[in-house]
Image (tube, helix red, strand yellow):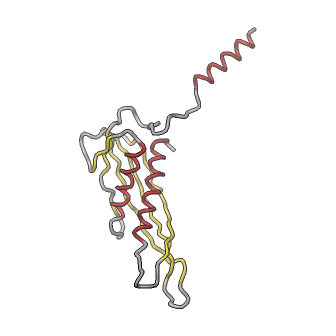
Amino acid sequence: MSRVFSAAMLFCLLLCAGCGYHPAGSPAHLPNTVHTLAVPVFQNDTQSYHTEIAFTQAVIKEFSSRTPYRLVAGTSSNADATLYGTITSYQVIPLTYNSQTGQSSSFLITIKARVKLVDRNGNVLYQNSTYLFRQQYETTQDLVTFIQEDSPAVQRLARDFAQAMVSDILESF
């Protein structure tokens, strides 16, 4: 009888413990006190032009589409938490060359970033200083059909960064 009782108790404890899953779109690991999130424009410690704008906009879009938080642009004393981001490195490296012209025909863009989510009392809720994203892009050699591809590559990197960062914050990985 005690063996059956022990098994039943173990089953009940496992049932109560749950599996850790939660409904999609619900912030799992941020405090219940966070309802408003401020996202000031990321800092840019590089020579890249407007990369911080692309990253900030991508993060705001990702948070607004995946969470119930009210987002505030810039810093606000009314925000429950503030997300600070910095673009720490921006590097473009030629990958392939056109043998006829000797010019680069494809490039690898690498961007490093760090973020810190701080509540209104200054407590760090999330921090990661090791984000690293890469994107390859090609250039056209024909001046008539030339399209500057580095800006769309930065946009794609910003989107990938925002998706990864918001997932990390919501899931606390």
Query: Which residue is pictured at 50% across the width and 65% down the height?
Result: 134
Q: Is residue 44 above or below residue 103?
A: above
Farthest left residue in view: 77
Q: Quadrant of residue 57?
A: bottom left
Q: Position of residue 46 (x, y in %)?
A: 36, 67
Task: Report how many numbered discs are placed on residues in the image.
Answer: 0
Taking depth in this image into account, of 132 and 60 the one nearest to the observer is 60
Q: Tell me where residue 154 appears, x and y as whole percent.
A: 42, 65
At horizontal 66% and vertical 20% (from top left) the residue drawn is: 11
On the image, the x and y values in percent for residue 52 come to 34, 61
Residue furthest to the front: 144
Q: Closer to the camera, 34 or 121?
A: 34
Task: Classify 18 as above or below 167.
Answer: above
Residue at point 48% right, 46% down?
A: 167
Query: Quick check: 84 left or right of 17?
Result: left
Where residue 97 appears, as percent x and y from the top left, is 53, 83
**Identity of the residue furthest to the bottom in this view:** 100
User: Is 118 on the left or on the right of 110, as rendered?
Assistant: left
Classify the position of the N terminus by image quarter: top right
Drawn side of residue 4 relative to residue 14, left or right:
right
Out of 140 and 89, give the one closest to the viewer.
140
Residue depicted at 32% across the width and 49% down the height: 39
